[in-house]
Amino acid sequence: MGGPTPSGRPLTGAWMSMPRDTNDPAALHTAILDKLSTVIDPETGADVVRMRLVEDLRVDKGGRVSYTFRPSSALCPIAVLLAVTIKKMVAQVPG
């Protein structure tokens, strides 16, 4: 995943392969959203799913995942921390 840009453009998560292939992308999609709902923005107290900071979440039949992270503002002081945390949480989901 690329780093935040000064222009405030969204950060796009690169396709990443999950530890194992999955036969059910919909179940994996749900599991990822559940995991991401534990990532809390400390400035608002809300999770990144509720705040809609993670968009375009896709899971293909091979278990590859992509998403777009959009910080709440171009000057979000914790954008990098959130981006790294989101990536780690996605990688922790088995499937």
Image (cartoon, rainbow, N blue to C red):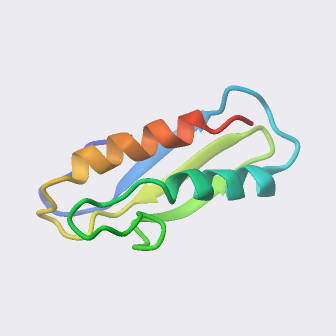
- At x 70%, y 35%, the residue is 94
- At x 48%, y 54%, the residue is 38
Q: Quadrant of the N terminus?
A: top left
Percent position of residue 69, x then y: 39, 58
- At x 54%, y 64%, the residue is 56
Q: Nearer the viewer, residue 58 or 49?
A: 49
Q: Nearer the viewer, residue 11 or 32?
A: 32
Percent position of residue 86, x then y: 43, 47
Q: Nearer the viewer, residue 58 or 27?
A: 27
Q: Is residue 15 left or right of residue 63?
A: left
Q: Nearer the viewer, residue 85 or 56?
A: 85
Residue lying furthest front: 45
Q: Is residue 24 above or below residue 54?
A: above
Residue lying furthest top: 19
Q: Is residue 1 above or below residue 82?
A: above
Percent position of residue 85, x then y: 37, 42
Q: Is residue 91 above or below residue 66?
A: above
Q: Is residue 56 left or right of residue 30?
A: left
